[in-house]
């Protein structure tokens, strides 16, 4: 395999991962053929007579076509990858599909038993702003949203909106500004196709006129899945995926925003994409919508209530964000949530476009119950014998009160009874026993878990609740084995599971989960996984299940009785992840020919991004649970010994994947787990070398939002002590500049302020350059010193800064010192921080004194 | 850390420069006359110099991923420099003769062997870059 075909393979693989259009890659194959035939022709002309065509020119053209085309694709993929995250579609795939012939009413005027106008089709075709679907927990909002997103009628209605939008825009082109906008748009598209190298103007028609994007918040998912960043990243990703011609524009805007040279990445190699900030994401989305003013954008956003408030970003802010986007005439948003006051105030009062779902689904529920019973052979037989069975259907539907989830669980339970030939009376009596309230029903299910399963059930619930994102099914099966046999890990070598054992494990675990959790946890399949090992994860049946497990005191005591010592559970999970890494099917996709050439050109080896992503996922999970195990336990040494074993296993896996990244220490820095960092086998001299590693550890620690802030301080200090230079420049800015810019750009809480002060103090103590200018576009060019004055009250700023350094920036807004009340600082502390003080003992004393300073007056 | 496509693009730019120069040698510069619409031979030279410089300027040696390609890039830039120096001398001489080809023109400032050497370098470069592209493509 040659260098180019390796690179083409990589582009193809990434294309699949990002679900991009494959047509553009096919064009690349044609270009490769052109080059090959031109080189052949050129070499034969030396001996034979010259052909009529000009092979030199053909070669030069074909080569530059391929170069430009491939680089465009690579740049596009690069930008899209920076927006993509591994769980981006997980929630959507997990949602139950609508039962046949249900929800069809959404496109009609009203339902038979309720006169409330629905107006959804009307809104799709001619409405504006936000259409709000609300309803109580478990009434089927997400299923309806999925139904809407996937339905052809939605596209048809939107198509009409898109047409009328284009028409009205044409009428208004007399207006100068629109004309300018349109010609700008045309120019943008033109330049895109010129850049593509194929120059065919006729392809202009393929430019998307109608863009739809969807996002499903998932409270039980990863941090991104329930944040505004996740929402915006996903929306920007979807929009750019459908309008690739805008990517170049976004790249340029991005480098301007971050203060880079304008032509970043247009030639030469790819630089690492910086992480996206919230403001940058929203301005990108607005910009894209504005630039493509002739196109229409319809966004579907499910589960606003699953959003998690953090960093002072409340539900009110989420609503404000949606309103900011929905104000464009070419944008509309369909959103769903529980009927919380904040959403009622925002959407219900202001617009006629909203429905209350549980009032509209009575017919759907009856149909679902009836169809599900009818499918059951035993039911059909019994019904013919005794028509009284029919009353069962009506009774279930009546009691449901619009909660689909309740119906789903009740029907499942009743059908089990049918197998034992329960009489109608028995079944109605069983139905009577089911609590009509959903939470009481969950409690009922948990109590029905057989006693001998309770220990494992409690552990499974505990682990699933604590996980940062749903864990693999195979991990749960390892947990059982390791718990049953502590020697399990020591007697197994590092070998991928063969497919028969994996299938056996999946099958066994699936059954055990069902018995153990009564279906409250379910197995979710990921259609994008190509390896069966990664295909299944364990997740909550429904958001309400997670809420219930977290809030119910009865459940808490159930779990604590089952699992006396949570710490042991976290260590067990870490051991399970170790087994996961040992048995994962890590491999590279290169062929034998390539293997032979590896010694010459080491970088040729092609690694599948899927395996690497999974390996990094295991790293993250391990560090995450190790952190839980380390804190609040006295058994630190056992955990650290386990970490050493894990480190060896991960080195082995990395070798198999030809991966030489520092991903494990990076994740440790991101999550701020100092104990693991101190115990790593790591070449610390790399940190102080003049050539910074591609992704440096200190940036991970400084710019991470993952770990607890107090742990971040320890990690940053440790790295500085290991010789990291805070002024080291990467991607135009030094570590210190990037960190200060992030502090200035983000709102922080008082608690965060305290820790960010300690981080800044540590950086300054290690010689950070206070006169450095910060890469912030909103505030003009601040110096780091100005930023310190802005961020911290004078009493603190004077601790860090040398004497007599007042703010220099004009119109600088200083810190409202009243916000934090601080005792006067003693001059010795000032002196000590300012001097480059470094014995560890003295430093510890210094920090404890600084912490005392932070003691609030009322404490 | 240049990507392989950048390396390929570099090879492509070298080919473009060589192709252009070879065509000038073979007499293609007459096209320039009709393009520029001038009979002033120095003005035509001016345009040729500009074009060669821009083709040569598009070759970024640092995009090479292998020593071999780096040498080829450097060599092609060297050949371009040599040619440009000769053309500058020709311009300074300012004789307004119409040449049949660039090769003939160069004979005004170069010896026969110097012209032949340049031609040899060009065809050698062409063969090497073509082979290199084939190697890259596999």
Image: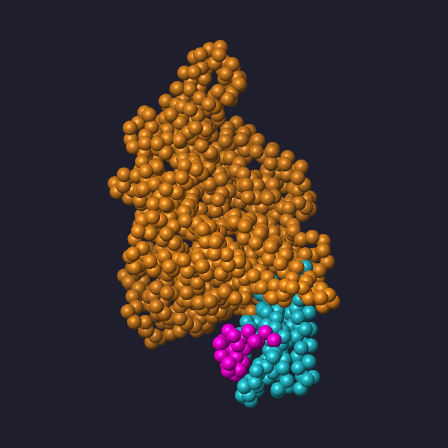
Chain colours: A orange, B cyan
* Front residue (pair A104, A570): A104
Q: Position of residue A618 (x, y in %)?
A: 56, 49
* Front residue (pair A680, A320): A320
Image quadrant where residue A661 sits: bottom right
Q: From which residue to which does the magenta span run?
A: B27-48
Please determine whether, in this image, residue A534 is positioned above or below residue A821.
Answer: above
Q: Is residue B124 left or right of residue A548?
A: right
Please give the name of the residue rendered at 47% of the width and 34% of the height, measured from the top-left corner. Answer: A96
Instruction: Give the prevailing secondary structure in the magenta stretch.
Output: helix
Please determine whether, in this image, residue A820 is positioned above or below residue A340.
Answer: below
Residue A441 visible in the displayed image: no
Please give the name of the residue rendered at 35% of the width and 58% of the height, measured from the top-left corner. Answer: A181
Image quadrant where residue A692 sits: bottom right
Count of marks placed on residues: 0
Residue A367 on the magenta segment: no
Residue sitting farthest toward the right: A47
Quarter holding the C terminus of chain A is bottom left
Q: Position of residue A805 (x, y in %)?
A: 34, 74
Q: Is residue A483 left or right of residue A547?
A: right
Residue sitting farthest toward the top: A385
């Amino acid at each position: 395999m040659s260098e180019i075909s390796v690179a083409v393979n990589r582009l193809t693989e990434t294309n699949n991962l990002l679900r991009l259009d494959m047509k553009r890659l096919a064009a690349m194959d044609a270009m490769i053929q052109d080059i090959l035939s031109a080189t052949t022709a050129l070499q034969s002309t030396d001996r034979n007579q010259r052909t009529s065509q000009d092979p030199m020119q053909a070669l030069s053209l074909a080569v530059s076509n391929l170069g430009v085309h491939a680089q465009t694709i690579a740049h596009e993929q690069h930008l899209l990858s920076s927006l993509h995250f591994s769980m981006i579609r997980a929630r959507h795939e997990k949602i139950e599909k609508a039962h046949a012939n249900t929800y069809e009413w959404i496109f009609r005027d009203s339902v038979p038993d309720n006169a409330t106008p629905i107006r959804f089709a009307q809104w799709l075709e001619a409405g504006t702003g936000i259409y709000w679907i609300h309803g109580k927990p478990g009434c089927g909002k997400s299923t309806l949203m999925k139904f809407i997103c996937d339905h052809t009628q939605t596209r048809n209605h939107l198509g009409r909106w898109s047409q009328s939008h284009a028409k009205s825009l044409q009428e208004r082109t007399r207006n100068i500004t629109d004309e300018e906008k349109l010609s700008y748009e045309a120019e943008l598209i033109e330049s895109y196709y010129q850049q593509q190298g194929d120059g065919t103007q006729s392809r202009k028609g393929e430019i998307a006129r109608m863009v739809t994007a969807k996002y499903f918040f998932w409270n039980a998912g990863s941090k991104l899945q329930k944040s505004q960043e996740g929402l915006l990243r996903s929306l920007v990703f979807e929009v750019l995926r459908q309008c690739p011609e805008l990517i170049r524009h976004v790249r340029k805007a991005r480098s301007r925003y971050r203060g880079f040279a304008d032509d970043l990445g247009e030639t030469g190699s790819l630089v690492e994409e910086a992480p996206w900030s919230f403001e940058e994401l929203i301005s990108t989305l607005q910009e894209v919508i504005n630039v493509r003013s002739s196109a229409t954008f319809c966004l579907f956003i499910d589960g606003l209530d699953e959003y998690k408030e953090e960093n002072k970003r409340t539900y009110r802010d989420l609503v404000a964000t949606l309103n900011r986007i929905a104000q464009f005439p070419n944008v509309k948003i369909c959103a769903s949530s529980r009927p919380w006051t904040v959403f009622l105030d925002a959407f219900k009062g202001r617009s006629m476009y909203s429905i209350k779902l549980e009032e509209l689904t009575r017919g759907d529920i009856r149909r679902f119950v009836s169809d599900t019973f009818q499918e059951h052979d035993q039911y059909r037989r019994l019904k013919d014998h005794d028509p009284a069975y029919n009353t069962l259907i009506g009774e279930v539907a009546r009691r449901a009160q619009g909660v689909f989830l309740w119906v789903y669980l009740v029907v499942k339970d009743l059908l089990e009874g049918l197998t034992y030939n329960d009489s109608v009376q028995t079944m109605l009596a069983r139905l009577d026993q089911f609590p009509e309230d959903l939470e009481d029903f969950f409690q009922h299910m948990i109590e029905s878990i057989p006693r001998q399963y309770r220990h494992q059930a409690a552990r499974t619930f505990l682990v699933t609740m604590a996980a940062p994102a749903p864990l693999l099914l195979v991990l749960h099966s390892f947990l059982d084995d390791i718990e049953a046999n502590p020697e399990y890990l020591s007697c197994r070598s590092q070998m991928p599971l063969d497919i028969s054992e994996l299938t056996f494990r999946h099958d066994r675990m699936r059954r055990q989960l069902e018995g153990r959790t009564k279906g409250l946890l379910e197995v979710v399949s990921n259609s994008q996984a190509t390896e069966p090992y990664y295909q299944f994860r364990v997740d909550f049946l429904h958001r309400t299940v997670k809420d219930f497990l977290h809030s119910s005191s009865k459940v808490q005591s159930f779990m604590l009785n089952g699992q006396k010592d949570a710490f042991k559970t976290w260590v067990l999970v870490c051991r399970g992840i170790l087994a996961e890494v040992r048995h994962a099917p890590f491999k590279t996709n290169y062929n034998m020919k390539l293997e032979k050439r590896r010694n010459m050109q080491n970088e040729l080896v092609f690694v599948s991004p899927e395996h690497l992503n999974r390996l990094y996922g295991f790293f993250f999970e391990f560090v995450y649970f190790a952190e839980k195990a380390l804190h609040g336990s006295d058994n630190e040494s056992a955990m650290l010994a386990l970490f050493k074993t894990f480190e060896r296993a991960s080195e082995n896996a990395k070798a198999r994947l030809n991966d030489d990244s520092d991903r494990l220490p990076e994740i440790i820095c991101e999550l701020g787990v100092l104990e693991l960092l101190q115990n790593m086998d790591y070449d610390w001299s790399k940190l102080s070398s003049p050539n910074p590693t591609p992704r440096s550890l200190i940036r991970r620690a400084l710019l991470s939002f993952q770990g607890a802030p107090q742990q971040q301080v320890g990690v940053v200090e440790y790295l500085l002590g290991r010789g990291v230079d805070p002024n080291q420049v990467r991607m135009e800015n030094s570590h210190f500049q990037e960190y200060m810019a992030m502090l200035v750009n983000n709102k922080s809480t008082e608690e965060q302020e305290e820790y960010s002060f300690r981080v800044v103090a540590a950086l300054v103590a290690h010689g950070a350059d206070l006169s450095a200018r910060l890469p912030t576009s909103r505030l003009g060019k601040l110096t780091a010193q100005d930023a310190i004055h802005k961020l911290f009250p004078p009493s603190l700023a004077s601790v860090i800064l040398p004497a007599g350094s007042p703010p220099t920036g004009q119109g600088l807004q200083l810190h409202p010192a009243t916000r934090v009340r601080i005792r006067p600082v003693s001059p010795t502390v000032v002196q000590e921080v300012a001097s480059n003080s470094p014995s560890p003992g003295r430093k510890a004393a210094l920090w404890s004194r600084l912490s005392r300073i932070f003691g609030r007056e009322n404490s | 850390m240049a990507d392989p496509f950048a390396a390929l693009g570099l090879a492509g730019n070298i080919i473009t420069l060589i192709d252009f120069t070879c065509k000038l040698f073979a007499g293609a510069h007459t096209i320039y006359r009709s393009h520029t619409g001038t009979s002033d031979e120095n003005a035509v030279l001016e345009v040729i110099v500009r074009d060669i410089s821009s083709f040569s300027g598009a070759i970024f040696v640092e995009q090479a991923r292998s020593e071999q390609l780096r040498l080829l890039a450097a060599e092609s830039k060297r050949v371009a420099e040599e040619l440009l120096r000769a053309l500058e001398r020709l311009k300074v001489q300012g004789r307004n003769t119409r040449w049949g080809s660039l090769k003939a023109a160069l004979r005004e400032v170069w010896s026969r062997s110097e012209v032949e050497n340049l031609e040899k370098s060009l065809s050698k470069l062409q063969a090497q870059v073509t082979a290199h592209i084939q190697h890259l493509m596999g």
